[in-house]
Amino acid sequence: METEMLGIILGAVLPVYPLLIVIYQKIGRYDEIVEEFKELRNEHEQLSGLHYAG
């Protein structure tokens, strides 16, 4: 009985793992893009402030 239950659980969970890896990778790329956007926005605000101040 336990072997059958383990087989059912593994049969349901294992096919999902590649999908979870892809989602994890996409989230990582999204985080990198957000960090780069924040840096560019800060740089723009600094340059815009200098432009308007002078």
Image (cartoon, rainbow, N blue to C red):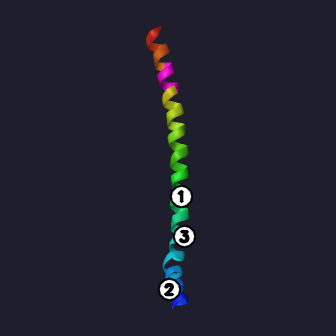
How far across and down, in percent of the image, does residue 2 sit? 53, 87
Of the two numbered discs 3 and 1 on the same chain, state the one appearing first in sequence.
Answer: 3
Q: What stretch is highlighted in magenta?
A: 43-47
C-alpha span from label 3 to label 2: 19 Å
**Mark whose residue sits in front, 3 or 2:** 2
Q: Mark 2 points at which residue?
A: 5
Q: Residue furthest bottom?
A: 1
Residue drawn at point x = 55 percent, y = 51 percent: 28
Q: Which residue lies furthest to the left in this view?
A: 52
Q: Mark 1 points at which residue?
A: 24
Q: Front-most of 9 and 31?
A: 9
Q: Please, what is the dominant secondary structure of the magenta stretch?
A: helix
Residue drawn at point x = 50 percent, y = 34 percent: 38
In the image, residue 12 sits, relative to residue 4, either above or below, namely above
**Mark whose residue sits in front, 2 or 1:** 2
Q: Name the residue under label 3.
A: 17
Q: Front-most of 16 and 48?
A: 16
C-alpha span from label 3 to label 1: 10 Å
